[in-house]
């Protein structure tokens, strides 16, 4: 390339000299072409060449820097893609766990609502039952209060009952209906299986029968 440049310098210089001769011939004016012009031409070329080389070197450095950054960015992107793939697996696993957890929460919530509904129904039933029990308690207390005089009268009569009276009752082949009912009730209170008149007579044969009546727990 250098010989061609040298030839170019020579040809340009000679062309200027030729043009200067034509210029003198046509307009009668001189355009001097000296060796200094040739040297200035070469110096100007060298200056431009150095400037362009500097520019090219700067551009090359910038290009190298850009390429380095692109390569670095490509490496970082590759690493991030690997990390992204790993994290995607983790995220998918966590998402599956969350779905299972949400399903459990939904089921537990449904069970809780159902249990709350059942509990509310039970509370309503208990409230109704408590009201009924309170009414029955009042009625029972009223009945007990009305029965107390009869109970006290029966206890007094029981204290006046003699062993001979028991013997007399046992001698009945067929007791009076009221006597039969009383004996049947006594059988029930004393948990005698046979509540017939025959069973009642067998119950009264016990020597401690009268004492058991006197000592019977009337409050139980």
Image (spheres, rainbow, N blue to C red):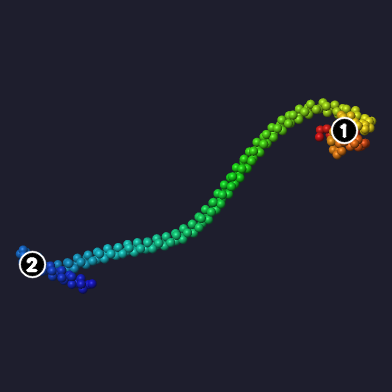
Circle 1: element type: helix
Q: Position of residue 119 (x, y in %)?
A: 64, 40
Asked which quadrant contains residue 143, the reply is top right
Would you say residue 143 is visible in this rendering?
A: yes
Q: Which mark lies nearer to you, 1 or 2? A: 1
**Residue, disc 2:** 22
* Residue 15, above or below 195: below
* Residue 76, above or below 166: below
For image coordinates 18% across by 68% down, the residue present is 42
| Quarter that holds the N terminus | bottom left
Picture mark count: 2
Which callout, 1 or 2, points at the residue further toward the start of the chain?
A: 2
Q: Which residue is more in the foreground, 17 or 39?
A: 17
Question: Within 10 Å of the Cα at label 2, are there few (<14), some (14-19), or many (20+) other Cα atoms?
Answer: some
Q: Position of residue 61 (x, y in %)?
A: 32, 64
* Residue 220, above or below 53: above
Would you say residue 200 is visible in this rendering?
A: no
For image coordinates 62% across by 40% down, the residue present is 117
Tell me: 133 left or right of 213.
left
Tell me: 22 left or right of 147.
left
For image coordinates 69% across by 35% down, the residue present is 129
* Residue at the limit of the structure toward the bottom, as seen here: 3
Q: Position of residue 34 (x, y in %)?
A: 12, 68
| Quarter that holds the C terminus | top right
Q: Mark 2 and mark 1 in contact (Cβ < 8 Å)?
A: no
Circle number at residue 183: 1
Circle 2: element type: helix
Asked which quadrant contains residue 110, the reply is top right
Q: Which residue is more in the foreground, 7 or 35?
A: 7
For image coordinates 24% across by 64% down, the residue present is 51
Q: Position of residue 153 (x, y in %)?
A: 85, 26
| Gap in angstroms between the C-alphas marked 1 and 2 | 171 Å
């Amino acid at each position: 390339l250098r010989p061609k440049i040298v030839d170019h310098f020579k040809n340009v210089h000679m062309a200027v000299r030729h043009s200067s001769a034509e210029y003198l011939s046509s307009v009668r004016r001189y355009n001097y072409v000296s060796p200094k012009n040739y040297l200035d031409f070469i110096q100007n070329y060298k200056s431009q060449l150095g400037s362009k080389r500097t520019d090219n070197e700067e551009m090359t450095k910038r290009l190298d820097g850009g390429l380095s950054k692109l390569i670095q960015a490509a490496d970082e992107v590759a690493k991030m893609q690997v990390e992204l793939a790993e994290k995607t697996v983790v995220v998918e696993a966590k998402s599956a766990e969350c779905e299972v957890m949400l399903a459990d929460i939904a089921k537990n919530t449904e069970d809780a609502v159902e249990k709350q509904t059942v509990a509310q129904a039970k509370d309503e039933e208990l409230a109704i039952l408590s009201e009924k029990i309170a009414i029955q308690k009042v009625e029972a207390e009223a009945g007990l209060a009305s029965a107390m005089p009869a109970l006290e009268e029966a206890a007094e009569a029981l204290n006046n009952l003699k062993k001979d009276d028991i013997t007399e009752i046992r001698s009945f082949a067929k007791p009076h209906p009221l006597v039969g009912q009383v004996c049947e009730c006594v059988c029930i209170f004393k948990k005698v299986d046979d509540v017939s008149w025959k069973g009642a007579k067998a119950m009264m044969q016990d020597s401690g029968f009268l004492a058991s009546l006197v000592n019977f727990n009337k409050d139980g």
